[in-house]
Image (tube, rainbow, N blue to C red):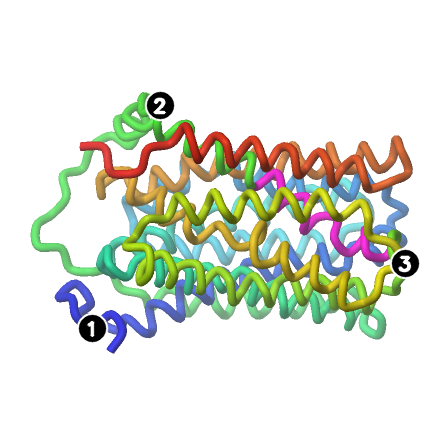
């Protein structure tokens, strides 16, 4: 039986996996719903490509600002209560977006949504570390990270549904779902520890992390990888619509295909890492990055003359690669530090990761507005991700620092 061979798996581990995954499903539905409906929102509010990019920048700014405090908060109060707070923050952000009369309100709502979601990654990563053994950790991390693309698949459906239902009404339904799940998170109990942890200043842990140059290089590589992922999802539906002259339904289908491919790959990469590579994860991350950069470099070639299967093949390939590395990266993140620093490490790493999402979309959008083409944006994205491959491949040494 999976995960039953270790004493640390006492308690309702199936429910825990479901709840950790569910946190990502619900949180992702909120933000990807906005991306899936971006063409409609762009027309209604008369937004430029740069302003569409700023929507994602606001979201990632919220995540970046709160990543460190969120990690320290999770270390101190635990997984369940942290996730409840996260869902409340995400829901209120979605309310602001759903009622927004202009771009300013959209940005404020996305900022709050990102702030709430910033508690999700350190909470779920800590849950994986506390509740599951090292031999199965990447598999479970991949399983819970599968919640991100599963939420994206659901949200992509909303992108097609918006043709018949107002996008604000759709977001209102998402808010209700988010609040219900937030209440459910209160049922998550913390694992019993054999001996109480010694409480120290959270800033002492941060000083340790900031002084670890090896971990700093790892965090930098996450920034560069997320530059690629952030741009891919921020502009995929707009790009498909404009480059292939397709409608909203096909653009949403492409987003759904990418998210579905990512759902399978996030779990699959974890299984491969645990069962076939003996926990050696860095090689997989490097390989994923190389293929991602090559596929991103092919995006400018896409046009209305391409057959549907070719478009879906590239999109699904990017779903398997640039959209699916996060579970491996998060596992490497928590395994590179001592247990008492897991939440703070994920938070610190999160700041760097989210900076990629802050810088990438507006840079991409500015290129589109200046040139009238998406080609330069995709090429820049591929080059930046290739640099990330170099940093993690040659600059980061795996293994926990004693």
Q: Residue furthest bottom?
A: 1
Comes first in the chain, label 3 or label 1: 1
Q: Residue furthest left?
A: 195
Expressed as whole percent of the image width and height from the top left, the position of residue 68 reads 41, 35
Q: Is residue 175 visible?
A: no
Question: Of 186 and 367, which appears nearest the observer?
Answer: 367
List the residue tagged with mark 1: 4
Nearer the camera: disc 3 or disc 1:
3
List the residue tagged with mark 3: 304
Q: Whole-Å distance between the Cαs marked 2 and 1?
A: 37 Å
List the residue tagged with mark 2: 213
Which residue is at 58% across, 48% downward? 291
Which residue is at 78% across, 54% downward? 38
Q: Quadrant of residue 209?
A: top left
Residue 148 bears which disc, if any? none
Secondary structure of the residue carrying tag 1 is loop
Comes first in the chain, label 2 or label 3: 2
Q: Is residue 236 magenta?
A: yes
Nearer the camera: disc 2 or disc 3:
3
Residue range corresponding to the magenta coloring: 226-241
């Amino acid at each position: 039986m999976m995960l039953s061979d270790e004493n640390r798996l006492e308690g309702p581990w199936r429910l825990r996996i479901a709840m950790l995954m569910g946190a990502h499903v619900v949180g992702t539905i909120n933000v990807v719903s906005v991306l899936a409906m971006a063409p409609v929102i762009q027309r209604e509010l008369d937004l430029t490509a740069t302003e569409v990019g700023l929507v994602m920048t606001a979201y990632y700014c919220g995540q970046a600002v709160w990543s460190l405090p969120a990690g320290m908060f999770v270390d101190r109060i635990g997984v369940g209560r942290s996730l409840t707070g996260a869902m409340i923050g995400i829901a209120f952000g979605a309310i602001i977006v759903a009622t927004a009369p202009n771009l300013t309100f959209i940005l404020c709502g996305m900022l709050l949504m990102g702030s709430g979601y910033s508690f999700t990654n350190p909470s779920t990563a800590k849950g994986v570390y506390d509740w599951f053994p090292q031999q199965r950790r990447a598999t479970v991390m991949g399983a819970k990270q599968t919640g991100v693309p599963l939420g994206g698949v659901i949200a992509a459906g909303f992108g097609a549904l918006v043709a018949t239902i107002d996008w604000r009404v759709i977001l209102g339904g998402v808010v209700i779902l988010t609040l219900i799940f937030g209440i459910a998170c209160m049922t998550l109990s913390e694992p019993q520890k054999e001996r109480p942890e010694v409480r120290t200043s959270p800033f002492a842990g941060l000083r340790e992390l900031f002084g670890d140059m090896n971990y700093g290089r790892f965090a930098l590589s996450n920034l560069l990888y997320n530059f690629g992922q952030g741009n891919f999802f921020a502009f995929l539906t707009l790009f498909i619509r404009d480059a292939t002259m397709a409608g909203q339904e096909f653009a949403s289908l492409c987003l759904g295909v990418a998210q579905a491919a990512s759902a399978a790959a996030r779990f699959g990469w974890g299984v491969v890492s645990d069962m076939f590579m003996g926990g050696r994860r860095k090689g997989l991350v490097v390989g994923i990055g190389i293929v991602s950069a090559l596929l991103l470099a092919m995006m400018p070639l896409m046009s209305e003359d391409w057959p549907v299967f070719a478009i879906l093949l590239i999109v699904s390939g990017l779903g398997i690669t640039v959209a699916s590395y996060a579970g491996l990266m998060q596992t490497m993140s928590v395994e590179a530090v001592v247990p008492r620093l897991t939440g703070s490490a994920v938070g610190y790493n999160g700041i760097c990761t989210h900076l990629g999402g802050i810088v990438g979309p507006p840079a991409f959008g500015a290129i589109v507005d200046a040139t009238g083409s998406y080609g330069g944006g995709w090429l820049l994205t591929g080059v930046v991700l290739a640099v990330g491959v170099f940093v993690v491949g040659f600059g980061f040494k795996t293994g926990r620092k004693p």
